[in-house]
Image (cartoon, coloured by chain):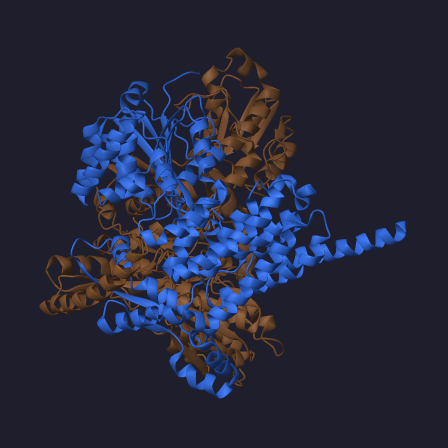
Chain colours: A brown, B blue
């Protein structure tokens, strides 16, 4: 059960021809797939395409009606390999993942797929995780497209264009026997917009058809000598076919403008922001009418030489707006124009920055510089209205702002089961000294940030244990690797655990088992325990680990901090030689709350006795050292002004978002912090016994309290 | 190329605050009012409690129809080109300004004046919070129009969520050309907690129409907390009049602090203990009188650092805290008071008459047990490994249920042991430490006044319980060891203050070690220089 439900939204996938679809970009992609007669879909979740996987999972019923097969793939490699069905059969398939990380994982299968070539359309929808909001190293998908010769679509971030790209992508794939990548930037995935729908198509050729009459073609297999033939085919047949298709179908846009001795070439995905920048420079209007000719590349690979020559001929200067590095398009364009002896001067990364997201601010600056130099008359003819004069920076000096405004890094959610584990790790290191900790991708990556500040490296999803391989030897304190359950099933079982067994590591791997692929939005994985009618869960990590030969396996519940500490100490001190695995269990609190909260509300409403716990701090005994916060970092454990007039440091305080997980109390216990924490048990619909007990207690406690109050009142100042 | 331009709105929020819900409401409202709406966001990791931004543009459908084309809308806010920033928290409003999204020629800034502290602010060993007054000043100075009020408080008041309040504030501001009924319809259509959400919306709408309160409610609330109270002429209990008179004999800047100290000492122990407190402060005040009237100790370069009666004030403050150190008796006493029960009830938002229980997280160690015993017995216990081991049977995490008769009685009896407190090991240890500290202060007062003041303030290093307390005491002792050396330096007080903030910079003591190393290397250089000169 994913964090976000699209149960309502997926109904719009049923829309017939001529209706208006409204929704997120990623949902539009799903509808476009169905309109294209896709037969099978797979993928692996991760921002910014997590919602695509969630939508597909929630749309299982609709997909079944249309005879579309959907899989939540085990990894991006699995998803890419799934496209193999389109090699031998005229069957359309689409897969999706987060790029470039997912593309890295998938690249073995992708390269082979691209070499074999496809018969049915094969579309790879990529969430290009680049720029603000990205959670991975900053690289481009473009390089993969070029190296394996997979066509790369980069449509305008506008729903009708995205939908068209999906539809044309399948056609392009089939016309050229080549898989096609469709890349969507973060904001394009989440952009809300609308488009006019077509009717969904049942796949013309289905998996059942394939199984009924299997066919094979030896020339499609990637063994020599076929591979040599395939390489030749790529260059001699598929590439020219792609150029033809792009030109004939007019996949790229030429937008005329009055200043036709200059021009701007841009990636489709940057179109909206670039147009806004032009508008702010008085060179375009709200509707996209521009004074400078534009060549918008909705297909960024392959580049079409004849289109470049056509656009650039007769121009003095052309600016290429290409996000990320290396500047593949700029390099290729220079070569094309040189070979065709087109004299236009090319600008790109010399006017615009080499690295980082091309925000409108960045584009406005770069485009402004280009226009100022090559077409100053455009700006001079129409002096900017005063309101357009840009106030570049706030009136307050940047340094002062930076000092005043605190950074707000991401962190573990309120009630996160991983928090007590990392608190335990912090305490452990206080006891035995610093450890080498190999971190992994997942919510637990946040442990590398304050207040935990632990983790030496992150090598990739599921590669926590593998990242400590070189240190899996004797001497010093044992290395500790952290891996999430998501990463474990993605590849960690073999790359980390199996590897450690085989190579006789003597280290410790902790697998944080929160029951879901939590960081990507709480999707189910093989060890998920929550009921799911479409997937087979409940495959335990413990069995898997033992299955690959780990002899030392312990389980601990993360909320039992003392127990976790004990098992950690044991793992690091035991005389047992060989890899040690601790499975630290605790259900993702976001998912848990979604499950439990409605039940509790209903029970209270039905008049059943319910006890709700939450925590608090006694301000009178808190001395404002905040050790508790440094060991926990829970969002609901915060500070407030000290009510004590003699103290200035703020006191700890548990705000109303507390879900009563109890970590703060456990931490206070484990770290011998302070007696200020209390747990309150709120009783709803108390029983007669509750009320009786409360009366008795109230009477006794009340009288004792009154007695001491009277004493205190003797000395009132 | 002028043409109709979209209305641009940025929502600056924290992950998990419902910014997405708010954006969806706004899309629905805009569409119902004949506008084309586009929204984007970058959820990703920021969703997990980080700072995040939602961006929306609205364009009149009629203008698009007339042009025969859809408008091209941007996917992110541009500095200098935002009509309205809606910030769910004060520092996030500041961040929007930092990003250049708020400009005083066109941006209406609608923000909540409440603070949600970031991890760096919360986890500081002292006070790490951003300067709220400066933040409010900043927020007030950059926009064309400001609507600022505590949206969280309004949400809580109506048992609603902050997104409803933000919607109301936005509606009331009139920035968007949409009717109020359309806003309300969006909430109704959502179908979740409609009644409370509508109430919160309406309240926020009206506050926004009135222009907000410029954060005054937040500041006023803060101003009332933790202030020293006025010194009365008459004690409520006549028996205490002599003590009050002694307080009133102090110089004016000291009186309020001393009064609080006396109150606290009585509350902690008894009037005799308060008298001891006063006696100690008075002794310092006598020395201070000489200095505050131009004594030799104040003639150093540090004169500007401290005002008159600074030493007495600092001592009165620190001594009050130290003399009421948090031993087990004190904690038990505080936990059993009726006022505490009432505070818990309020803090956990129990409904009127709702039953609730309280469990305390106590972890007594042998040291604490021995500390509560008569001094000689306590020392003997700590010296005997066997006894310590035996006592560990009762140590470790304990959940004491204060709401039950047995739990309450246990704490009540422990709290009642204060009559024997003066005989306990912990008391004797602390008392000895206090006296040594006072002697040092008094000795320094005449020779290095500013350093004496710093030493008086140094009590703040020692706080907390268990390991935290031990670390604080260790740091305090380290600093005190340096006193004699620093007393020879004219900038001794400044160096001491620097050491103090270093001690509070990190738990591991890295900053303190660095500062200490610098001092000693400086000392070496100085000695070398002097030798060279000689």
Number of numbered discs overlaid on the protein picture = 0
Query: B459 or B195, which is in the foreground?
Result: B459
Where residue B247 sits: x, y (%)? 44, 48
Q: Residue furthest top?
A: A381
Say whether residue A266 is left or right of residue B200: right
Q: Residue at x 63, y 35 (%)?
A: A334
Q: Quadrant of the N terminus of chain B?
A: top left
Q: Position of residue A17 (x, y in %)?
A: 22, 38
Task: Work out whether residue A579 or residue A419 is closer to the camera in this orientation and state it.
Answer: A419
Residue B463 pos. (x, y %): 49, 60
- Residue at image position (39%, 83%) is B393
Q: Is residue A238 visible?
A: yes
Q: What x and y, as percent, mark residue A426?
A: 50, 66
Is B502 displayed left or right of A522 in the figure?
A: right
Q: Residue at x 55, y 44 (%)?
A: B309
In the figure, A186 relative to B146: above or below? below
Quarter of the image for residue B152 reads: top left
Left or right: A454, with B450 as reference point: left
Q: Is residue B160 above or below residue A77?
A: above
Q: Is residue A513 visible?
A: no
């Amino acid at each position: 059960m994913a964090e976000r439900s699209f149960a309502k939204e997926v109904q719009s996938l049923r829309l017939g021809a001529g209706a208006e679809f409204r929704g997120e970009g990623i949902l539009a992609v799903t509808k476009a797939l169905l309109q294209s007669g896709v037969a099978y879909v797979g993928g692996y979740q991760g921002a910014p395409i997590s919602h695509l996987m969630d939508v597909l999972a929630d749309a299982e019923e609709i997909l079944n009606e249309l005879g579309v097969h959907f899989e939540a793939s085990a990894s991006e490699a699995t998803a890419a390999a799934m496209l193999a069905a389109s090699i031998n059969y005229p069957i359309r398939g689409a897969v999706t993942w987060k790029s470039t990380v997912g593309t890295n994982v998938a690249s073995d299968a992708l390269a082979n797929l691209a070499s074999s070539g496809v018969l049915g359309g094969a579309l790879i929808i990529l969430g290009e995780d680049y720029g603000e909001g990205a959670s991975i190293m900053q690289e481009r998908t473009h390089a993969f497209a070029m190296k394996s010769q997979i066509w790369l679509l980069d449509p305008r971030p506008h729903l009708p264009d995205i939908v068209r790209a999906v539809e044309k992508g399948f056609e392009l794939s089939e016309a050229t026997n080549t898989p096609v990548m469709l890349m969507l930037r973060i904001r394009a995935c989440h952009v809300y917009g609308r488009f006019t729908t077509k009717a969904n198509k049942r796949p013309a050729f289905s998996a059942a058809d394939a199984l009924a009459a299997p066919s094979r073609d030896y020339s499609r297999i990637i063994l020599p000598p076929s591979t040599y033939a395939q390489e030749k085919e790529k260059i001699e047949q598929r590439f020219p076919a792609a150029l033809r298709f792009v030109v004939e179908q007019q996949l790229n846009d030429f937008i005329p403008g009055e200043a036709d001795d200059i021009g701007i070439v841009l990636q489709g995905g940057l179109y909206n922001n670039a147009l806004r920048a032009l508008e702010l420079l008085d060179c375009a209007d709200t509707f996209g009418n521009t004074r400078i000719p534009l060549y918008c590349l909705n297909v960024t690979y392959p580049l079409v030489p004849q289109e470049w020559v056509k656009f650039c001929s007769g121009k003095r200067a052309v600016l290429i707006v290409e996000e990320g590095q290396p500047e593949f398009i700029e390099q290729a364009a220079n070569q094309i124009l040189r070979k065709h002896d087109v004299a236009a001067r090319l600008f790109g990364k010399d006017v615009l920055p080499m690295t980082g997201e091309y925000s409108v601010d960045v584009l406005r600056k770069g485009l402004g510089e280009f226009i100022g130099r090559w077409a100053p008359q455009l700006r001079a003819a129409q002096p900017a209205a005063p309101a357009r004069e840009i106030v570049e920076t706030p009136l307050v000096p940047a340094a002062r702002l930076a000092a005043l405004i605190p950074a707000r890094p991401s962190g573990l959610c309120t009630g996160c089961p991983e928090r007590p584990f990392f608190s335990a790790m912090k305490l452990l290191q206080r006891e035995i000294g610093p450890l080498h900790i190999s971190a992994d991708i997942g919510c637990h990556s946040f442990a590398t940030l304050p207040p935990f500040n632990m983790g030496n490296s992150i090598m990739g999803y599921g590669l926590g244990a593998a990242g400590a391989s070189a240190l899996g030897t004797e001497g010093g304190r044992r290395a500790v690797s952290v891996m999430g359950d998501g990463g474990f099933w993605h590849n960690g079982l073999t790359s980390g655990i199996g590897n450690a067994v085989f190579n006789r590591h003597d280290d410790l791997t902790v697998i944080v088992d929160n029951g879901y692929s939590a960081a990507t939005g709480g999707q189910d994985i093989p060890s998920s325990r929550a009921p799911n009618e479409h997937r087979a869960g409940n495959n335990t990590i413990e069995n898997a680990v033992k299955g690959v030969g780990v002899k030392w396996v312990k389980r601990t519940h993360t909320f039992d901090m003392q127990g976790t500490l004990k098992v950690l100490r044991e793992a690091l001190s035991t005389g047992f030689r060989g890899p040690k695995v601790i499975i630290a269990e605790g259900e993702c609190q976001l998912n848990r709350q979604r499950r439990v909260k409605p039940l509790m509300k209903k029970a209270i409403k039905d008049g059943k006795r319910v006890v709700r716990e939450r925590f608090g701090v006694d301000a009178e005994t808190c001395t404002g050292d905040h050790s508790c916060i440094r060991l926990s970092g829970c969002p609901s454990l915060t500070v407030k002004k000290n009510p004590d007039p003699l103290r200035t440091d703020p006191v700890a305080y548990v705000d109303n978002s507390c879900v009563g997980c109890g970590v703060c109390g456990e931490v206070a216990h484990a770290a011998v912090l302070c007696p200020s924490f209390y747990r309150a048990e709120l009783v709803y619909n108390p029983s007669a016994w509750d009320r009786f007990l409360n009366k008795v207690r109230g009477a006794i406690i009340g009288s004792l309290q009154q007695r001491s109050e009277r004493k205190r009142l003797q000395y009132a100042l | 190329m002028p043409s109709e331009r979209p209305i641009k709105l940025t929502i600056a929020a924290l992950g998990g605050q419902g910014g997405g819900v708010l954006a969806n409401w706004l899309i629905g409202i805009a569409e119902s009012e004949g506008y084309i709406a586009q929204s984007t966001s970058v959820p990703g990791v920021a969703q997990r409690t980080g700072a995040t931004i939602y961006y929306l543009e609205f364009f009149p459908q009629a203008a698009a129809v007339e042009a025969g084309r859809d408008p091209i809308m941007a996917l992110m806010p541009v500095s200098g080109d935002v009509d309205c920033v809606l910030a769910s928290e004060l520092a996030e409003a500041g961040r929007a300004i930092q990003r250049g999204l708020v400009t005083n020629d066109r941006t209406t800034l609608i923000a909540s004046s409440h603070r949600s502290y970031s991890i760096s602010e919360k986890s500081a060993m002292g006070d790490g919070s951003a300067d709220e007054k400066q933040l409010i000043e900043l927020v007030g100075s950059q926009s064309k129009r400001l609507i600022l009020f505590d949206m969280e408080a309004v949400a809580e008041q109506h048992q609603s969520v902050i997104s409803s309040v933000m919607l109301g504030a936005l509606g009331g501001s009139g920035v968007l050309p949409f009717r109020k009924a359309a806003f309300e319809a969006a909430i109704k259509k959502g179908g979740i907690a409609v009644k409370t959400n509508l109430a919160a919306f309406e309240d926020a709408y009206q506050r926004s129409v009135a222009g907000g309160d410029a954060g005054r409610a937040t500041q006023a609330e803060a101003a009332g907390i933790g202030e020293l109270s006025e010194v009365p002429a008459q004690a409520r209990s006549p028996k205490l009049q002599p003590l009050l008179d002694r307080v009133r004999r102090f110089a004016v800047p000291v009186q309020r602090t001393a009064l609080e100290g006396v109150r606290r000492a009585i509350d902690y122990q008894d009037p005799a203990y308060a008298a001891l407190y006063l006696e100690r402060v008075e002794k310092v005040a006598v020395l201070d009188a000489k200095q505050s009237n131009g004594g030799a100790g104040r003639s150093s370069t540090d004169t500007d650092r401290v005002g008159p009666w600074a030493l007495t004030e600092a001592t009165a403050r620190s001594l009050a805290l130290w003399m009421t150190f948090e031993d087990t008796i004190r904690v038990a006493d505080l936990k059993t008071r009726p006022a505490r029960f009432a505070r818990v009830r309020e803090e956990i938002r129990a409904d009127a008459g709702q039953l609730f229980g309280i469990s305390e997280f106590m972890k007594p160690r042998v040291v604490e047990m021995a500390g509560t015993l008569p001094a000689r017995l306590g020392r003997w216990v700590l010296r005997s490994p066997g006894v310590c081991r035996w006592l560990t049977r009762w140590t470790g995490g304990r959940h004491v249920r204060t709401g039950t008769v047995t739990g309450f009685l246990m704490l009540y009896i422990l709290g009642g042991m204060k009559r024997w407190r003066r005989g306990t090991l912990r008391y004797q240890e602390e008392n000895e430490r206090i006296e040594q500290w006072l002697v040092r202060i008094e000795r320094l007062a005449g020779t290095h006044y500013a350093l004496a003041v710093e030493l008086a303030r140094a009590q703040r290093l020692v706080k907390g319980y268990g390991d935290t307390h031990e670390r604080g005491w260790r740091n305090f002792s380290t600093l005190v060891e340096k006193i004699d050396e620093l007393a020879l330096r004219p900038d001794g007080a400044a160096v001491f203050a620097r050491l103090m903030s270093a001690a509070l910079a990190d738990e591991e003591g890295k900053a303190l070690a660095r500062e200490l190393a610098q001092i000693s290397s400086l000392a070496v250089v100085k000695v070398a220089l002097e030798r060279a000169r000689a």
